[in-house]
Image (cartoon, grey):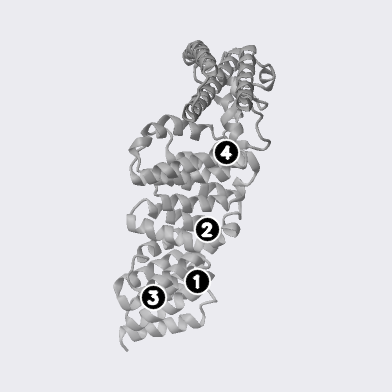
């Protein structure tokens, strides 16, 4: 009897009594690599019974890995064995197994890749934490593995995310920490979109404002608020995607202050360097999230604005003084135009055009005077006046109810300050109305 026949006979005898004790299982592992027939039998029997002897699962896995590496003809059977082992293995064995499967997933054989996918799904359902731990580690090691891993997460984890990721607080915390680490190391737009989908599935981030602010941290991490903005195509795409995803988070009460601060200080200064397509996309994104930039975020300001406020007061005084002078000159022009008495139709039309132009310029000027007076009367000391929920509309016409975009653009100061009309603004408005009425009378005549 040859050595292989003897080994094969020992395996058959051990297989008949495998459920009796671990020594028979050990006998099978000892003879698993003696010859081709023993190897084929081991590939069939070891995975089948390994769940009965969990303490030997790691050794059994090593044997299957050796057989996989030994010959192409054992590949498919070994991968199928990995799947069976994954259904009952402990966390350490699962991590080791997923590490191996992650390497095999680069195979060009479609059947092998399909079998690897099935084995990974089995491991995911057995121990989501151990499986994702190994997958996240692979994402940092190789670009091809990273691409295959993200595809697997998109295809297999997302549909199962609600049940697998919400199984415990420990799993949610583990996944969150790893995703934040990966997102902070630099990801592309596709990966960001995928990871945000994973996070949105987790109950941890569905608990109102607190969860929304935690979720917003991932957006800030991906953008890297401490770094300068690069206007190149890839970075612009990524930023616009990140900022756009924040809209859903702002709806749940998260503060937009940090993102808007980054946009105003680092993105907009490089606006002209962006392509026209990205410029339009950026403006659309800012328009979509701007209604969430309410006054409450102004309370978070920690800068010293005294110098800027002094400059604002100086500019307001200059604007008010020059606007008054210009308004006075316009009224003189208006008076002279009213004194003219043309005789021909062309001259009358030309005069009417001049009157209308003068009147529109005077209206614009008086509006500016009214706004400047309103700002000066607020007696600005710090920018916290922007934080008041009740706000004044600086335009002379009342604002339509429910117009949030207009409110975000026109809100300045408190409602109490807005109730007092300045006398100069009133006087200018009355003069405009009188001038308009005078023109109507002249036209009637």
Q: Which one is in front, 255 or 83?
A: 255
Q: Position of residue 368 (x, y in %)?
A: 54, 20
What mark, if any, has residue 111 been given in the picture?
A: 3
* Residue 258 visible: yes
Q: Is residue 306 above or below residue 398?
A: above
Q: Which residue is mark 2?
A: 128
Along the polypeptide, which appears first: circle 3 or circle 1? 1
Distance in Å between CA atoms under marks 3 and 2? 24 Å
The quarter holding residue 382 reads top right
Q: Which residue is mark 1?
A: 22
Left of 438 or right of it: where is 31? left
Q: Which residue is mark 4?
A: 213
Q: Residue at x 48, y 69 (%)?
A: 85
Along the polypeptide, which appears first: circle 2 or circle 4? 2
Which element carries disc 4, helix, strand or loop? helix
Q: Position of residue 66 (x, y in %)?
A: 34, 69
Q: Residue at x 44, y 84 (%)?
A: 12
Crowd tier of the residue under label 2, counting other residues whose Cα lies within 10 Å: few below 14, some 14–19, many 20 or above? many
Along the polypeptide, which appears first: circle 2 or circle 1? 1
Crowd tier of the residue under label 3, counting other residues whose Cα lies within 10 Å: few below 14, some 14–19, many 20 or above? few
Crowd tier of the residue under label 4, counting other residues whose Cα lies within 10 Å: few below 14, some 14–19, many 20 or above? some
Q: Nearer the viewer, mark 3 or mark 1?
A: 3
Q: Is residue 139 above or below residue 117?
A: above
The extreme front residue here reads: 343
Quarter of the image with the N terminus is: bottom left
| Badge 3 vs badge 2, beta-carbon distance below 8 Å | no
Which element carries disc 1, helix, strand or loop? helix
């Amino acid at each position: 009897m040859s050595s292989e026949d003897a080994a094969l006979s020992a395996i058959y005898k051990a297989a008949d009594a495998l459920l009796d004790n671990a020594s028979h299982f050990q006998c099978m592992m000892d003879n698993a690599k003696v010859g081709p027939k023993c190897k084929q039998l081991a590939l069939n029997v070891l995975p089948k019974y390994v769940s009965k002897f969990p303490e030997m699962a790691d050794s059994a896995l090593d044997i299957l890995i050796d057989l996989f590496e030994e010959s192409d003809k054992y590949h498919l059977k070994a991968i199928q064995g990995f799947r069976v082992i994954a259904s009952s293995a402990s966390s350490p064995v699962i991590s080791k197994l997923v590490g191996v499967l992650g390497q095999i997933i680069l195979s060009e054989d479609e059947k092998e890749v399909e079998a690897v996918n099935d084995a990974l799904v089995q491991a995911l359902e057995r121990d989501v934490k151990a499986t994702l731990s190994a997958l996240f580690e692979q994402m940092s090691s190789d670009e091809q593995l990273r691409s295959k891993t993200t595809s697997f997460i998109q295809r297999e984890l997302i549909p199962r995310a609600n049940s697998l990721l919400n199984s415990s607080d420990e799993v949610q915390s583990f996944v969150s920490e790893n995703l934040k680490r990966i997102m902070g190391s630099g990801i592309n737009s596709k990966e960001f979109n995928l990871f945000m989908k994973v996070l949105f599935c987790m109950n941890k981030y569905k608990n109102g404002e607190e969860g929304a602010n935690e979720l917003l941290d991932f957006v800030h991490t991906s953008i890297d608020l401490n770094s300068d903005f690069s206007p190149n195509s890839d970075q612009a795409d990524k930023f616009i995607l990140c900022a756009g995803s924040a809209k859903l988070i702002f709806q749940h009460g998260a503060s937009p202050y940090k993102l808007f601060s980054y946009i105003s200080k680092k993105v907009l200064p490089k606006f002209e360097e962006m392509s026209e397509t990205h410029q339009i996309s950026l403006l659309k994104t800012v328009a979509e999230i701007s209604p969430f930039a309410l006054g409450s975020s102004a309370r978070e300001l920690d800068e010293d604005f005294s110098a800027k406020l002094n400059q604002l007061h100086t500019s307001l005084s200059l604007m008010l003084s020059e606007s008054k002078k210009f308004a006075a000159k316009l009224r003189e022009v208006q008076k002279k135009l009213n004194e003219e008495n043309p005789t021909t139709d062309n001259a009358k039309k030309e005069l009417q055009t001049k009157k209308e132009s003068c009147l529109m310029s005077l209206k614009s000027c008086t509006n500016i005077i009214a706004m400047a007076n309103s700002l000066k009367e607020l007696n600005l000391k710090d920018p916290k006046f922007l934080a008041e929920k009740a706000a004044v509309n600086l335009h002379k016409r009342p604002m339509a109810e429910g117009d949030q975009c207009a409110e975000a653009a026109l809100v300045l100061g408190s409602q109490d300050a807005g109730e007092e009309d300045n006398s100069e603004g009133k006087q200018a408005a009355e003069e405009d109305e009188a001038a308009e009425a005078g023109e109507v009378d002249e036209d009637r005549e």
